[in-house]
Image: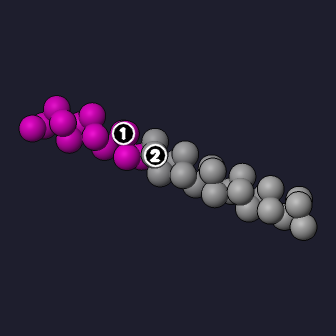
Amino acid sequence: MSIQTRSGAPARRALLLVGRRTVDLLRTDSALCR
């Protein structure tokens, strides 16, 4: 169980970071389009 939590923590963090980056890119793209 500990192995799953350890491997799951960094994965969730990476997903959150990627999500934030994608949101930022979308915002910048929309701003540039406008």
Q: Is residue 7 above or below residue 29?
A: above
Magenta region includes residue 7 = yes
Secondary structure, magenta segment, majority class: helix
Which label lies toward us, 1 or 2?
A: 2
Colouring mode (rainbow / by chain / secondary structure / one colour): one colour
Helix, strand or loop for disc 2: helix
From the viewer's perspective, tell me whether residue 34 is left or right of residue 14: right
**Mark 1 surroundings: few (<14), some (14-19) or many (≥20) residues within 10 A:** few
- Mark before the other along the chain sequence, 1 or 2: 1
The quarter of the picture where the C terminus appears is: bottom right
The residue at which mark 1 appears reads as: 10
* Identity of the residue drawn at 84% across and 64% down: 31
Q: Residue furthest bottom?
A: 34
Most foreground residue, 16 or 6: 16
Residue 12 placement (x, y as % from top left): 37, 46
Residue type at numbered disc 1: Pro
Give how far apart the Cα atoms at labels 1 and 2 are: 9 Å
Give the magenta part as a residue range. Answer: 1-13
* Identity of the residue drawn at 54% across and 52% down: 19
Give the quarter of the image for residue 6.
Answer: top left
User: How many numbered marks are there?
Assistant: 2
**Mark 2 surroundings: few (<14), some (14-19) or many (≥20) residues within 10 A:** few
Helix, strand or loop for disc 1: helix
Q: Is residue 23 above or below residue 15?
A: below
Magenta region includes residue 12 = yes
The residue at which mark 2 appears reads as: 15
Give the quarter of the image for residue 1.
Answer: top left
* Identity of the residue drawn at 28% across and 40% down: 8
Q: Is residue 34 above or below residue 5?
A: below
Residue 20 placement (x, y as % from top left): 58, 54
Residue type at numbered disc 2: Leu
